[in-house]
Image (tube, coloured by chain):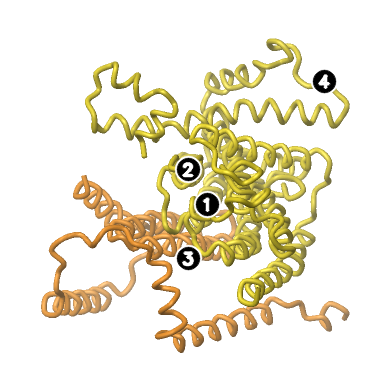
Chain colours: A orange, B yellow
Amino acid sequence: MEVAIFWLLAVIIIASAAATVFSKNIIYSAFSLLFSFLGVAGIYAMLSADFLAVTQIMVYVGGILTLILFGVMLTNRITMMSLKTDVFNFIPGLTIAAVMLAGLLYVIWVTGTWASDSPAAWDTTVETIGTLTITRFLLPFEVVAILLLIAVVGASFIARKDKQKIQS
Amino acid sequence: MHDLVLKTLGIGDLLAWLGVPDGSLVYPVVASVFPLVFLIIFALLAVYAERKVSALIQNRLGPMETGPWGLFQTTADILKLIQKEDITPKAADKILFFVAPVLVFTGTYASLAAFPWSSGFVGADLNVGIFYLLAISSLVVAGLLMAGWGSNNKWSLYGAVRSTAQIVSYEIPAGLAVLTAIVTTGTLSMNGIIRHQEGMWFGLLFQSPFLFVAFIIYLIASLAEVNRTPFDLPEAESELVGGYHTEYSGMKFAMFFLAEYGNMFIVSGIAVAVFMGGWLTPWGTEPSVLMGVVWMILKSLFFVFFQMWLRWTLPRFRVDQLMYLCWKVLIPIAFACLIGQAAVEVYL
C-alpha cells in the first residue's frame, strides 16, 4: 500500500514537473507546479514530517503559487497569445543542466546514505521544531525575520501612493 | 478509526452482515465516503434554510410550493442541475475549465479529513490538525483562480482575483486569531485543542478577554474567507454577474455550490472546535461519541445560521473598505490579542 502511494506521488511529481518545464503556456506551467508541490507535500507526509508537509502546502501553494499566478495575470491582458514561452539558448542551457545533474548525482552517490526502512512512528514534530527554532537556530530565525520585515517595508513603500503626484 | 465511525453509524454491522471480511479495504472506503454524504445532505438543507431565513428576514414566505413548506425545493433544484446541459464556452480553456471545480471541491473535501466530528471520530487526528485545516484551503484559492482564468470571461477573472486577494489577506487575521487560542491550548491537534477545553463553559470563549476578541476576529475573517456577505465582492451579482462561476452550469456549477456550502460548515466547525469546545457539551463535559457528533454539528449549524443571518441584514463592503478592515483594523487587533494572551499565559 505504502509503495503504491509512493509511486503514485512520484509519478504525479515528475509528470507535473515535466509539464511545468515543457509547457508552452505559462499558465499551464504555473498550475502544474501546484500538483508538483502537492506531491512533494505527500512525500513529506509519508516520511512522518507532518509539519513540513503542511508548511509546504501553506507556503508554496498558498503563498508562492498564488503570487506567481497573480504576477502572470496582472502583467498581461486576457489574451492567451502573449502568454507563450519558448526555448532559447538550447545548448548552453542543456550543458548547465547536465553539469548540475551530474554534480547532484555524484553527491548523492558518494555521500548519501539511504535509510533502509521507513522512519519511526508518528511523533509530534511541532514541539521539537519550535524549541530548536528559538534555541539552536535563533540567529538564522531572527535574520529571516528581519529579511521579511525589510521586504514588507519595501513592498509597502513601492505600493504607496505618491501624495504630491495625486495633488498636482 | 473507521471501525468507530461505522459502528456509530450502524453501517459496520450491515457490511459484516453482507459478508465483507474484517480488515478489508471496503471499511475505510465507506468511512471516507461519510463526509461526502453529510456534505450533500447539509448543502441540500442549507440552501433550503438560506431561502427560508432570507424570507423570514424580508417578511416573505420563501419556497412553499414543492412539498410541505417547500421542503423538496432544493431536491428539485438538484435534479434540475443534474439534467442540465454541460456547457463549456467556446473561448474557454477546456482543461482549466474542467479541472477548476474539481480542485475547489477537493480543497473543501480534504479539510474534512482532519475535521473533529467527535472524540475518536476524526478522519486523521493530525499533530498539526488546525494548521492543516488552515493550509489546505489554499487549494480552493488555486481552484478559484483556475476557474476565473479558464472561463476566459472578464467577470469571472475579476471575481477570481478579488476572491483570491480577499482570502489570502483574511487568512492572516484568521490565523492569528487561531494562534491566540493555540497559545493557551499548547497543541495543534484538533482533539487536543478540544480536550483542553474540558470543564469550561462554552470552551475558551469566556476564558479571557483576548480570546473573546480573537473569536470575533476569526468570525469576521472566516466570513471573508468563504466569500459571504458583507464580504461577497467576488460574487457581487450587481457588478460581476456571478463572479468566478459566471460561465459554469450544470454539475460543475453544483460542485462549486457544494464546495461553497461545505466551506461555510468547515469554517464554522473550526470556530466551534477552537473557541467553543467542539464536541464537548456547552457545560464542558465529555459526551458519548454519538452525542459528540450531535453537539459538534449543532454548534456548527448555529454559526452557519449566523452567516446566513448576516448575509440578509448587512450591505456589501467596497474593495478598499475590505482591505482597510483587514490590514489596518483586524491584523493589529489580532496581534494585540496574541501578545496579550501570551502575557496572560506567562504571568498568570
Question: Residue B262, located in which quarter of the rendered image?
Answer: top right
**Dot 4: chain letter:** B
Q: Is residue A133 visible?
A: yes
Q: Chain of mark 2?
A: B
Residue under label 2: B119
Give the secondary structure at mark 4. loop
Q: Residue at x 31, y 31 (%)?
A: B27
Relative to B52, residue B89 above or below: below
CA distance separating discs 2 and 1: 9 Å
Q: Are marks 4 and 3 on the same chain?
A: no
- N-terminal-most mark, 1 or 4: 4
C-alpha gap between disc 4 and disc 2: 40 Å
Judging from the image, mark 1 belongs to the subunit labelled B
Quadrant in the picture for the C terminus of chain B: bottom right
The local crowd at label 3, few if under 14, some if 14 to 19, many if 20 or more residues have their Cα within 10 Å, is: some
The picture quadrant where one finds residue A36 is bottom left
Task: Identify the residue under disc 1.
Answer: B195
| Callout 4 crowding tier (Cα within 10 Å): few <14, some 14–19, many ≥20 | some
The residue labelled by disc 4 is B61
Q: CA distance from mark 4 to mark 3?
A: 47 Å
> Which residue is at 55% across, 80% downward?
A148
Q: Nearer the viewer, residue B313 or A118?
A: A118
Who is closer to the viewer here, B332 or B277?
B277
Label 3 resides on the chain identified as A
Residue B218 picture location, percent across and down: 67, 56
Residue A27's spot in the image, x, y percent?
A: 46, 56
Determine the CA span between mark 1 and mark 3: 29 Å
Tag 3's secondary structure? Answer: helix
